[in-house]
Image: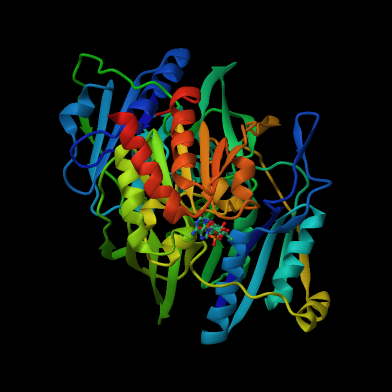
Amino acid sequence: MKFVAVIRQVPDGESRLRIQEGRVDLSGATLILDQMDEYAVEEALRLKEKHGGEAIVVGFGPERAEEAIRTALAMGMDRGVHVVFEGFADPVAVAEALVPVLQEEAPTLVLTGGQQADWDSQALGAALAEGLGVPVVAWTTVIELEGDTARAKHDLDEGAEWVRVRLPALFTTQQGLNEPRYPTLPGIMKAKKKEVRKVQAEVRPKVVLLSEEIQEKARLGRILDGKDPVAAAEELVRLLHEEAKVI
Amino acid sequence: MVLVVLDHDGNKLRKGTLEALTRARRLAEGLGEKVAGVLLAEEGAPLEEARKYVDILYTATLGPYTAERWAAGVLAAAKEGAKAVVVPSSRQSRTYLGRVAYALKAGLLEDTLDSSLEGGEVHATRYAYLNRVTQRVKAPLPVVLTVKPNTTPLAEPLGTSAEVVPLSVPQVPTVEVLERVAEEKKGVSLTEANVVVTGGRGMGGPEAFKLVEELAALLGGAVGATRAVVDAGWRPYGEQVGQTGKTVQPALYIALGVSGAVQHLAGMNKSKYIVAVNKDPEAPIFKHADYGIVGDVHHVLPALIEAVKKLKD
Ligand SMILES: Cc1cc2nc3c(=O)[nH]c(=O)nc-3n(C[C@H](O)[C@H](O)[C@H](O)COP(=O)(O)OP(=O)(O)OC[C@H]3O[C@@H](n4cnc5c(N)ncnc54)[C@H](O)[C@@H]3O)c2cc1C
């Protein structure tokens, strides 16, 4: 069996973002393997440990994104494919670039994060599934393989649902599916020697980025001492009523 | 034509659908096109209501929702000549639209705050980077766009009754739905609420949420939860606010015993006013708060309820 995790490198949510000439400038940001994709990597590893086969990480992005692929290799993935592209590409265009690479690998299961932390998009998994002609189970919290099918639980807008799906299929992952392992030192050493095949991406962007701007709303920061909870609560309610006028 | 996916609950069009209709009408006007609707259903659907809002109505009964069936339904309607597909944003729609956009080779603009036609292209604004950045993007036609809730005025009925065109939707390989784990829905819907009261792990346990519910009800709002609370099984997943949960933008967001992790902030940092109650003065949530109380939520919350009751009297 072949388990593929599709990953991207994104800025750490805690890191400061700067804007340069109307674009987010990531040169000073800490870049990480998208945490939502970490669940995909972890699940590929667990499935391989349980059922045998190969676990492959496929990453999309500029040269620097190889670091995120190496992180996945240090967690234990067997080898990597890096689809290299510098610049902005929308999720549908990225899916188009990745589909031929995935078809060549012919995976049993493809896993990727439910939402990418830079685009705030949920489309990559579904677009990949369409390109591959396989079903998608989005926002998965349980995956169990049973022969040539998988039984999975996933979240809906309200509630959740159990489904069965014939493999190959694509799953998008999220918090709750598993607890991703940390790369160990021996893992990091081994990862340096693992193969990362480079593929130059054919990308036909569908969406053009015109401008980006940071709009962190300035907050009032009026923090009251709650030693006397009744007095603090009354003052807060007064402020919300008279000043903010929201109650 | 400009195609609108008419999301509904079986009986009524959802509020988000009326917003999507407004957006679609604006685009259609600019393009000199008609507005078509597609009404997909597991079984029943608000057919008569839907006919009042569009020029043509495509319909199909597809069985239980799966991303594949809905994508096939929307595609069947889109193939009748859609220049743009406009959809109310939900987790479900955002999943199947990835398929639709790929199949149509269309630009996908997700969770847009606004949209306009400029020189034959669709321009839109949306948030990115965990809701911290506002992006302006554009895409040539055909385009698929989802409409973020509470961004757009609601469409009025047209005063006509559209022709109904049943669609023939191809069977597609999909998942087999084994069991739905339904969640009881009560009170105001989270994404539409004007006030959201969220409890975090600092609430200490599920019992304490009775008071969270009480405060939310007093303020005419909805209850939210953090992932920590949902994972602990204290509250249902449908109440989760954040990157893996819902995005809310109420006038007032009250975070009780919530630390303020970035993934949680991603779901609520655009709220107009943010209030935090936390016993730790260093909790990150205070950096994002307009008002706050440093204190034990078990003492502060009952006092807050009393103070609100007093105000109302
Ligand atoms: C990929 C990914 C996606 C995620 N998506 C989401 C998401 O959608 N939504 C989400 O919420 N999280 C999400 N998380 C998890 C997030 O990182 C945090 O773990 C989570 O938000 C923490 O929840 P919390 O604030 O309730 O709990 P904690 O971090 O445990 O904080 C509890 C807070 O309560 C305070 N407290 C304790 N006792 C009291 C008391 N008696 N009175 C007052 N205050 C008290 C503490 O000081 C603390 O600040 C995600 C994480 C990842 C990696």
The answer to which quarter of the image holds residue B157 is top left
Q: Nearer the viewer, residue B278 or B134?
A: B278
Question: Compared to A15, does B16 lie above or below?
Answer: above
Look at 46% across and 23% down and name the residue there. Answer: A242
Between A153 and B232, the one lying in front of the other is B232
Give the quadrant of residue B29.
top left
Left or right relative to B303: residue A18: right
Instruction: Determine the residue positioned at 49% across, 29% down.
Output: A239
Give the image location of residue A143, x and y in percent: 44, 73
Q: Quadrant of residue B21?
A: top left
Give the left or right position of residue B258, taking residue A97 as reference.
left
Image quadrant in which the N terminus of chain A is located: bottom right
Q: Is residue A208 above or below residue B240?
A: above
Q: Residue at x 39, y 64 (%)?
A: B205
Q: Position of residue B174 (x, y in %)?
A: 36, 60
Residue B146 visible in the shown view: no
Note whether residue B213 is visible.
yes
